[in-house]
Amino acid sequence: MGRNSTSLCRERLVKPFSSVRGLSGRRRIAGLLVAGLMAVLAGCAAGPAEVRQDREAVVKERSQARWNALVADRLEEAYGYYSPASRSVMSFPDFIRSIKSGFWKSARVDNVECQGEDSCDVEVTIEYQIHGTRAKTPLRETWIRTDEQWWYVKKG
């Protein structure tokens, strides 16, 4: 069995500096270690705004990919973006029956706004054809994060 992280840390970080004599030498080394640790933490830590932007970018990409699949009639791919809970109440054959092939002509994700860590609202403009006439309309959809992945939630 390997050594635990505490003993490895002590061996790699503390032991090399244990031979430093005198209070000023140890203070200097302690200062360097603290400064280095702060630099590492600052580089790794993203602020709340950056994290929200990352979430929103991921959701925007997934939502647009789902709509691209619907527009292209790649229904199995589009169904794969549904949340596990949505798929548990709507089977793939039911999903297929609910889709009118060729109905959507285009879709554009306009905006994503995440209220928390695990829920985002998406605004989409879709273009569709009905009775030979093209029309555009905005719609709003909800995406949730489950098991580190973002999913579309079917409402109604």
Image (cartoon, rainbow, N blue to C red):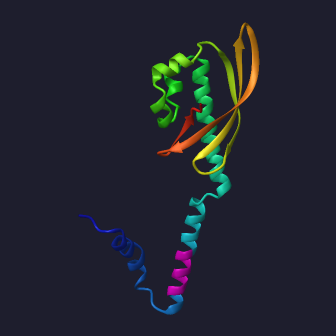
Q: Position of residue 32 (x, y in %)?
A: 55, 77
User: Which residue is pictured at 38% across the width and 76% down the height?
Assistant: 10
**Above or below, 35 relative to 92:** below
Could you say which is closer to the camera, residue 89 or residue 5? Answer: 89
In this rendering, position of residue 143 left or right of residue 17: right
**Vertical order, 25 against 32 (above or below):** below
Position of the N terminus, as image quadrant, is bottom left
- Given residues 85 and 66, the one toward you in this image is 85
The residue lying toward the viewer, choosing from 124 and 139, is 139
Question: Which quarter of the figure has residue 151?
Answer: top right
- Look at 51% across and 36% down and name the residue there: 83
Magenta residue check for 154 = no
Residues in magenta?
26-34
Quick one: which residue is furthest to the left in this view? 1
Task: Single out the residue that lies furthest toward the top.
Answer: 132
Q: Quadrant of residue 128?
A: top right
Q: Quadrant of the C terminus?
A: top right
Q: Position of residue 122 (x, y in %)?
A: 67, 37
At which x and y percent is residue 126? Answer: 70, 24
Q: Residue furthest front?
A: 156
Residue at image location 36% in from the left, 74% down from the top: 11
